[in-house]
C-alpha cells in the first residue's frame, strides 16, 4: 500500500490532469503591449490624458512604479495602461523603457485552476484565477476554506506565454483543520438528515449514506464499512459540518475521496533542475543545478555564482513544481544579473569668497540621491547660505545629472534699521529700530503705529538688503501718512418720477467707500432700477465725489399668466393625454399628475409633482411638464450592464445627454459634450450609444451620444433595459459618475417611484426619472431602492 505522501502526490497529479485546463483569452482590442516603463526620480510624476503637458492630469506615478506600455506617440511620450485599465501618458524623459521580446495583445487574460486540498488529498474547493502573459504570483486565499489553516507554500509563481500556456498549469494549496469541535454538553433541539458520498478521484460515486445530525457544529467521519471490498478512504477521513437552526447545513453534503487498493510504486524523493545565471544580454555566467522534491520547492539565487559587484535584476526566488516522474515546471531556472554602475560625485564646502572649507567624494549607485549639507564640515558659527539639500541622479549608463554639489557658508552678520512714521507736515508719529540679519528683508508699514484715520501715502512694502559686510542698502525707512479727513454724503431713495421715499446723511473717511441700496427704504414690492452699489471717493482735501447718491425704484409690475403644456406619455413616448395649466408669475404652482389621464393599471415613472415658476417677463420654467406612465405588461427585470469596451474617439465634438434622446436632461448647464480621448462604451439603444468619458477636472460622466459617432469597426451589443418600478427608500442623490467621485445632480425623496433600468455592479443601480420636467437617467445606490 502507498504511504500517505505517495497517495497525496498521485491524487494531486490526477486532479491537475483533470482540472488544469488552460483558459482562453477573454478579449483583446487589437493593440499590443510592447514593453514596460519604470518611473525614475525620487518623487512622483504626473500622468496625463494626452501626450503633452497641455492635457489634464489624471493620476500620479510613484518612483519605481512599473506600467505596461503600447509604445510612443508623436511627441515621444509613452502611452501606458493604469491598474483600472484606463490609458494615460507619461513623458519619455521621466521613465526607463524595457522592451518585451514578443509584444503581447492588450487585454489578453487567461485562467488557471487553483485547488484547495487537505493534507490527505481531499478537495475542499477549486477556483479559476485570472492570469496575464508573463510571470504571475498566485496567493492562497484562506477565506475560500473557513475552518482550515494553510500548511503549504502561500504563494506560487505561474509563467504564462503569449498563447496562454501556463507553467505549471494548475496550483495546489494544502490545508488542515484549524480546530476540533468539543463534545456537545446539551441535547440538540432538532435533527436533520445529512447526505454523505464516497467518490473516487474521477468524481464517480462509489457509495453513499445519510447521517442524522443535531443542530450545531459537529465532526462527521467517514465510515469505511460502507465501501465496496477493495476500496479505502484515501482523502480526509472527517470534516466539520454546521447545522443551522433553520435545518440548513454547511456544507450541504459530505464528500470523501476513496481509492482502490493497488501495489505501491516507490516514488523518487529528489530531482534536479538546471539553474542558469545570465547577464542582461542573455550571456551565460554560470550554470549549476538545484535539488527539488516532488511538489513545490523554492530555488533562491546565490550571488556567489556571479562575478563580484554584479546585482540581481530578476526575482530572487522561483517556485519550481516537480511531478512524481521528475518533470519540473519551469524546466530551467534563470537568474538575470547586471554589472553594478557607480558614479563619483564631488561635494564641496566653500565660504562666501569661494575659499574651500572641505571637500569629499561619494560613490553613488544608479537612481536619485539626496545630498544634504553637513554643518560640521564648516567652521563653528558659519551658516549655510543656500539650499540644504540637492538631488543628484545617476543614470543606468553611469552618467550623472551633475558631478559637483557646492554648499556655501558664511559668518552671520546683522545691522540696525530705523523705521520712522511721519505725517505730511513732517511731524514724527512713531519711531522704532529693528535688527536684521544678512539678506533681503521686506519692511511693511503697520497702520497701528499711527492714529486712527491716518492714510498711508507712500509704498506699504520696502525691501532692505543687509550685505555680507554688515552694511545696509538704506539706513532708514520712512512711511508717510496723511491726517484723517472726512466728508458728508446725502443718500436719497426715490421713485422713477423723482418722488422721494427717504433720505439720510452718511459720513465717509478719506479714500474709497461703497454705498449699497437698502430695499427696506422703498415701499414693499418696488424694484431697484439704478445700480445697487455706488462708490464714493473722499479726497485728501475732504471733498466727496459724488456728493450725493440717489437710488431709483420702480413700482411692481402686474403679474403675468402663462399656459404651460402638461403631457402624459407611455413608456415608448406615445402621448396618452395633453392639456394646459395656467401659471401666474405672482407665485410658483405645483402641478400633480392626474392618474385618470392614463389607462387603468399604468404605473407612473418618476415624481408625481412638478413645480412651475413664471418670470415677470412671462418665461415658464420648465416650459413643459411631462408625466410618463408605463404599461405593466412591459415591465421587465433589470439586468447587469454588459462589459464595456474602450476606443479612441477622434471625431467632431458630440453632445452628451443623460438618456437616448435630445429631450433628456443634459449636464453642464445644457452644454455637456465629448470631443476626444479614450472612451468606454457599454452598448447601444436605438440610434444612441451609452458611453463614459473623463472630464478635465479629473471626474467622469456616463451618458449617451449619437450611435453614428462610434468607429465603424467597433462592434457593440444592443442593450435591453428593464422597466420595473422601484421605490426610493431614503433620500438618494442621483449622479452620472459612479466611476471616480460621484457628484450629486439632485436628490430623490424617500417614497419616490423610479424606473429601474439596470445595474452597473453590486453598488450602483441605473434608473430613469424626471428632473425639472425633463426625463433623466442616472445612478443611485442600490441600498437606497426597493423593488415590490
Image (tube, rainbow, N blue to C red):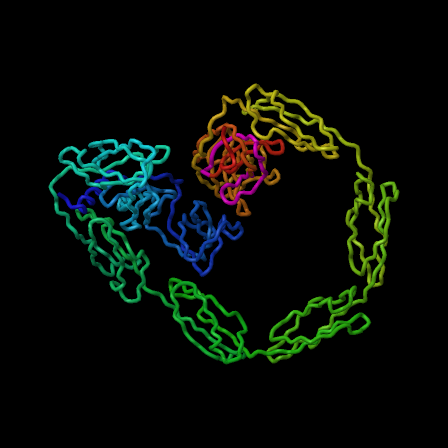
- Residue ID at (54%, 31%): 754
Task: Find residue 159 and report its horizontal and vertical position in percent.
Answer: 29, 48
Q: Main secondary structure of the magenta part?
A: loop
Q: Is residue 431 above or below residue 209?
A: below
Image quadrant assignment for residue 430: bottom right
Q: Is residue 611 visible?
A: yes
Residue 767 percent coordinates (x, y): 52, 33
Q: Camera-side residue: 242 or 779? A: 242
Q: Is residue 532 left or right of residue 334?
A: right
Q: Position of residue 105 (x, y in %)?
A: 36, 43
Residue at left 41%, top 48%? 70
Residue sitting nearer the eye, 21 or 730: 730
Q: Nearer the viewer, residue 466 or 712?
A: 466
Residue 743 is a magenta residue: yes
Magenta residue span: 733-762
How far across and how far down the image is residue 444, in percent?
69, 68
Name the residue furthest left. Answer: 263
Task: Decide which of 172, 347 is in the foreground and name it.
Answer: 172
Amino acid at each position: 500500500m502507498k504511504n500517505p505522501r505517495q497517495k497525496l502526490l498521485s491524487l494531486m497529479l490526477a486532479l491537475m490532469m483533470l482540472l488544469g485546463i488552460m483558459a482562453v483569452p477573454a478579449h483583446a482590442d487589437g493593440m499590443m503591449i510592447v514593453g514596460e516603463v519604470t518611473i525614475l526620480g525620487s518623487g512622483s510624476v504626473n500622468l496625463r490624458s494626452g501626450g503633452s503637458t497641455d492635457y489634464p492630469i489624471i493620476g500620479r506615478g510613484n518612483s519605481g512604479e512599473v506600467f505596461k506600455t503600447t509604445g510612443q506617440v508623436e511627441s515621444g511620450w509613452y502611452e501606458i495602461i493604469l491598474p483600472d485599465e484606463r490609458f494615460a501618458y507619461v513623458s519619455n524623459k521621466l521613465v526607463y523603457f524595457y522592451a518585451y521580446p514578443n509584444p503581447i495583445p492588450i487585454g489578453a487574460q487567461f485562467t488557471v485552476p487553483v485547488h484547495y486540498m487537505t493534507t490527505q488529498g481531499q478537495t475542499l474547493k477549486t477556483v479559476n484565477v485570472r492570469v496575464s502573459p508573463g510571470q504571475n504570483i498566485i496567493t492562497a486565499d484562506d477565506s475560500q476554506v473557513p475552518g482550515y489553516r494553510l500548511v503549504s507554500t502561500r504563494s506560487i509563481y505561474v509563467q504564462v506565454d503569449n498563447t496562454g500556456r501556463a507553467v505549471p498549469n494548475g496550483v495546489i494549496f494544502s490545508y488542515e483543520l484549524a480546530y476540533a469541535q468539543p463534545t456537545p454538553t446539551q441535547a440538540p433541539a432538532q435533527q436533520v438528515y445529512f447526505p454523505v458520498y464516497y467518490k473516487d478521484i474521477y468524481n464517480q460515486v462509489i457509495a453513499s449514506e445519510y447521517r442524522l445530525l443535531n443542530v450545531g457544529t459537529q465532526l462527521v467521519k467517514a465510515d469505511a464499512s460502507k465501501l465496496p471490498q477493495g476500496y479505502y478512504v484515501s482523502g480526509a477521513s472527517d470534516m466539520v459540518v454546521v447545522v443551522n437552526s433553520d435545518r440548513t447545513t454547511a456544507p450541504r453534503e459530505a464528500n470523501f475521496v476513496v481509492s482502490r487498493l493497488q501495489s505501491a510504486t516507490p516514488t523518487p524523493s529528489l530531482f534536479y533542475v538546471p539553474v542558469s545565471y545570465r547577464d542582461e544580454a542573455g550571456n551565460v555566467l554560470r550554470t549549476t543545478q538545484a535539488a527539488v522534491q516532488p511538489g513545490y520547492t523554492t530555488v533562491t539565487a546565490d550571488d556567489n555564482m556571479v562575478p563580484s559587484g554584479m546585482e540581481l535584476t530578476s526575482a530572487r526566488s522561483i517556485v519550481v513544481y516537480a511531478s512524481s516522474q521528475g518533470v519540473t515546471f519551469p524546466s530551467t531556472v534563470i537568474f538575470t544579473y547586471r554589472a553594478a554602475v557607480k558614479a563619483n560625485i564631488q561635494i564641496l564646502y566653500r565660504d562666501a569668497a569661494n575659499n574651500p572649507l572641505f571637500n569629499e567624494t561619494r560613490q553613488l549607485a544608479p537612481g536619485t540621491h539626496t545630498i544634504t549639507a553637513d554643518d560640521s564640515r564648516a567652521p563653528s558659527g558659519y551658516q549655510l547660505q543656500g539650499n540644504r539639500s540637492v538631488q543628484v541622479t545617476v543614470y543606468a549608463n553611469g552618467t550623472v545629472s551633475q558631478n559637483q554639489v557646492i554648499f556655501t557658508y558664511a559668518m552671520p552678520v546683522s545691522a540696525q534699521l530705523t523705521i520712522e512714521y511721519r505725517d505730511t507736515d513732517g511731524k514724527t508719529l512713531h519711531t522704532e529700530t529693528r535688527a536684521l540679519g544678512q539678506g533681503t528683508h521686506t519692511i511693511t508699514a503697520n497702520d497701528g503705529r499711527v492714529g486712527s484715520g491716518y492714510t498711508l501715502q507712500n509704498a506699504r512694502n520696502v525691501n532692505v538688503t543687509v550685505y555680507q559686510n554688515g552694511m545696509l542698502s538704506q539706513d532708514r525707512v520712512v512711511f508717510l501718512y496723511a491726517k484723517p479727513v472726512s466728508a458728508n454724503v446725502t443718500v436719497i431713495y426715490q421713485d422713477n418720477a423723482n418722488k422721494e421715499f427717504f433720505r439720510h446723511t452718511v459720513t465717509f473717511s478719506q479714500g474709497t467707500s461703497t454705498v449699497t441700496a437698502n430695499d427696506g427704504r422703498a415701499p414693499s414690492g418696488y424694484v431697484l432700477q439704478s445700480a445697487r452699489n455706488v462708490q464714493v471717493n473722499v479726497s485728501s482735501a475732504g471733498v466727496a465725489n459724488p456728493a450725493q447718491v440717489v437710488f431709483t425704484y420702480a413700482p411692481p409690475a402686474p403679474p403675468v399668466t402663462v399656459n404651460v403644456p402638461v403631457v402624459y406619455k407611455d413608456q415608448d413616448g406615445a402621448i396618452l393625454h395633453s392639456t394646459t395649466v395656467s401659471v401666474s408669475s405672482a407665485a410658483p404652482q405645483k402641478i400633480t399628475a392626474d392618474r385618470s389621464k392614463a389607462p387603468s393599471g399604468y404605473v407612473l415613472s418618476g415624481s408625481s409633482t412638478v413645480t412651475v415658476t413664471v418670470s415677470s417677463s412671462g418665461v415658464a420654467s420648465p416650459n413643459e411638464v411631462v408625466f410618463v406612465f408605463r404599461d405593466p405588461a412591459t415591465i421587465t427585470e433589470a439586468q447587469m450592464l454588459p462589459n464595456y469596451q474602450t476606443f479612441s474617439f477622434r471625431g467632431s465634438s458630440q453632445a452628451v445627454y443623460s438618456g437616448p434622446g435630445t429631450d433628456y436632461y443634459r449636464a453642464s448647464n445644457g452644454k455637456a459634450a465629448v470631443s476626444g480621448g479614450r472612451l468606454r462604451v457599454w452598448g447601444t439603444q436605438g440610434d444612441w450609444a451609452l458611453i463614459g468619458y473623463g472630464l478635465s477636472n479629473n471626474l467622469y460622466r456616463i451618458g449617451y451620444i449619437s450611435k453614428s459617432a462610434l468607429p465603424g469597426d467597433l462592434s457593440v451589443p444592443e442593450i435591453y433595459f428593464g422597466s420595473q418600478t422601484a421605490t426610493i427608500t431614503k433620500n438618494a442623490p442621483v449622479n452620472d459618475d459612479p466611476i471616480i467621485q460621484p457628484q450629486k445632480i439632485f436628490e430623490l425623496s424617500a417614497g419616490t417611484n423610479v424606473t429601474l433600468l439596470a445595474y452597473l455592479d453590486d453598488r450602483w443601480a441605473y434608473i430613469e426619472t424626471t428632473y425639472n420636467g425633463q426625463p433623466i437617467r442616472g445612478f443611485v445606490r442600490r441600498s437606497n431602492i426597493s423593488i415590490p
